[in-house]
Amino acid sequence: MTNRAAAFPPNWPARLGLLALAGYAVFATAQLDITWTRLGHGMGEGARFLARMFPPNFARWELLLEGMLESLQIAVLASALGILLSLPLGLMAARNLSPWFVAAPTRGFIALCRSLHYVIVAIVFVKAIGFGVLAGVAALTIASMGFIAKLFAEAIEEISMKQVEAVRATGAPPASVLIYAVLPQVASRFVGFCLYQLDSNLRNSTLVGIVGAGGIGGTLFAAFKRFDYDFVCAILLAIIALIFAAEVISGRIRAAMR
């Protein structure tokens, strides 16, 4: 009787890897002093904290509205600047359109923009140019460039080069090649990238304010320091409403682009 190979042989390297991951998770939990006692105590404190947040207090709606408008302006400005700067960066980073000595350093610069979290970049700009919305706009612009330029370059590298070669064969200049052969193939995806980045910047603009870069984050942090938790709840509800509204609008724009 011959031995037959198992239909689904066990993957021992994967099993050993999962076992090692589980063992390290247990080790890390012990090192970080994560216990059921602390977790239970934290759940009780969290329940008392949530109880102090309700009902939300919208009495200072003018301060709330001012912070929300500031965050919206930061997000829109940072997205617009990031998108504008990402267009040439994405074209220069695409290896099917640019020579290696242009694409390689451009990709390095894009990776540099993505290497640090936007809150850290906001802290750097706050220290460099002072508190206020300018630091927030600059930080989110850098973050937008790192995200959109990378995706735009990858989208360009996936285009069909037949259209590019056909337009080039007519003797068209490089600008016409981009307008008539490259951009039509990536326009819908690029719009989707831009809408996603605007939505992301709306959320991120609430965080950069915590480090002094303007927006509703500063108002939220001040309310926390004053233990004004009912106003904190009002701010959080306003932020959630803004994000939901942005999601609805961006969804309709995407549907109209199809």
Image (tube, rainbow, N blue to C red):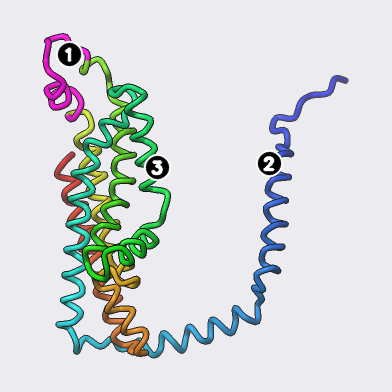
Task: Residue at 19% x, 50% y: name it.
Answer: 81
Residue 52 coordinates in the image, percent (x, y): 38, 90
Whether residue 107 is situated above or below residue 44 in the rendered picture: above
Residue 93 coordinates in the image, percent (x, y): 32, 32
Residue that mark 3 sits on: 111
Element on which disc 3 rests: helix
- Is residue 142 among what the camera can see? yes
Between label 1 and label 3, give the one nearer the viewer.
Answer: 3
- Residue 171: quadrant of the picture: top left
Label 1–label 2 contact, CB within 8 A: no
Pointer 3 or 2: first along the chain: 2
- Residue 190: quadrant of the picture: top left
Q: Which residues are magenta?
A: 165-183
Residue furthest to the right: 1
Crowding around mark 1 (Cα neighbors within 10 Å: few <14, some 14 to 19, many 20+) is some
Distance CA(mark 3)–CA(mark 2) = 31 Å
Task: Residue at 37% x, 35% y: name it.
Answer: 107
In the image, what residue type sits under mark 2?
Answer: Ala
Crowding around mark 2 (Cα neighbors within 10 Å: few <14, some 14 to 19, many 20+) is few
Distance CA(mark 1)–CA(mark 2) = 50 Å
In the image, what residue type sits under mark 1?
Answer: Arg
Residue 54 coordinates in the image, percent (x, y): 33, 88
Which quadrant holds the N terminus? top right
Residue that mark 2 sits on: 14
Residue that mark 1 sits on: 168
Residue 171 is covered by the magenta coloring: yes
- Residue 221: quadrant of the picture: bottom left
